[in-house]
Amino acid sequence: AQSVTQPDIHITVSEGASLELRCNYSYGATPYLFWYVQSPGQGLQLLLKYFSGDTLVQGIKGFEAEFKRSQSSFNLRKPSVHWSDAAEYFCATSGGSYIPTFGRGTSLIVHP
Amino acid sequence: GAGVSQSPSNKVTEKGKDVELRCDPISGHTALYWYRQSLGQGLEFLIYFQGNSAPDKSGLPSDRFSAERTGGSVSTLTIQRTQQEDSAVYLCASSLGRGENGYTFGSGTRLTVV
């Protein structure tokens, strides 16, 4: 069965600092992987996705993620965080079932 | 429509009452998903519709929960005899095919059972 682990419940960074949010997945074959962002009171917005090919994926809002099969990871990065990036971030995977499984989320807090 | 539309956005109901939550997916999206998000929790899968196939109901927490999708478009999630533990945000998503382009979410329905 597929699963996703986001080991960090909260991450605090200063505005302008770099960011890395961790995501580990469990799935036997090559997974489909996603990162979503959720602002308070809103639904989830897709940041980026990985299916195959280049392991470094570029997304919206300046985010990128790197698929590392050897580490079963798909970490999200941003070189310089803005205050508007404060939100909840969810990593998700879908495998053979085509039903995406979500991690518990990481809450990003941005200090001015 | 341009996005996934959910209604109502907020619903307060008394314990024991039935509620219906509606989801209007993106036109042409064959797949539709319902999730539940409790405070501070991730997304809990409830049910999945794909085209005219039988839905995957494996995530429904009890027989008080049911869902239907009419004409391959609008979906209604029904919770009968609501309990306080049903209080959560109910999110609907749709996708083209099997999600190769990702999943588009609605803004959710916040259900509060008092």
Image (cartoon, grey):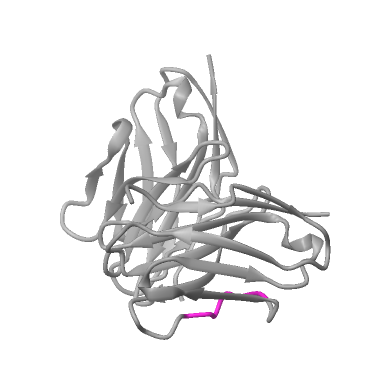
Q: Which span is picked out in magenta? A: B56-61
Q: Estimate the x, y position of residue B49 in percent, counting from the top left.
A: 42, 74
B8 sits to left or right of A53:
right
Q: Estimate the x, y position of residue B41 in percent, counting from the top left.
A: 63, 53
In the image shown, does B15 or A74 lie closer to the viewer? Answer: B15
In the image shown, does A51 or A5 lie closer to the viewer? Answer: A51
Residue B51 sits in quarter: bottom left
At a point 41% along the width and 24% down the height, the residue shown is: A81
Q: Estimate the x, y position of residue B27 in percent, counting from the top left.
A: 30, 59
In the image shown, does A33 or B105 lie closer to the viewer? Answer: B105
At a point 32% along the width and 35% down the height, the residue shown is: A63
- Is residue B112 found inside the magenta-colored segment of the image? no
B73 sits to left or right of A83:
left
The chief SS type of the magenta part is: loop
At a point 42% along the width and 37% down the height, the residue shown is: A20
Q: Estimate the x, y position of residue B79 in percent, counting from the top left.
A: 68, 70
Asked if residue B33 is positioned above or below residue A83 in the image, the reply reads below
At a point 29% along the width and 47% down the height, the residue shown is: A66
In the image shown, does A64 or A67 lie closer to the viewer? Answer: A64
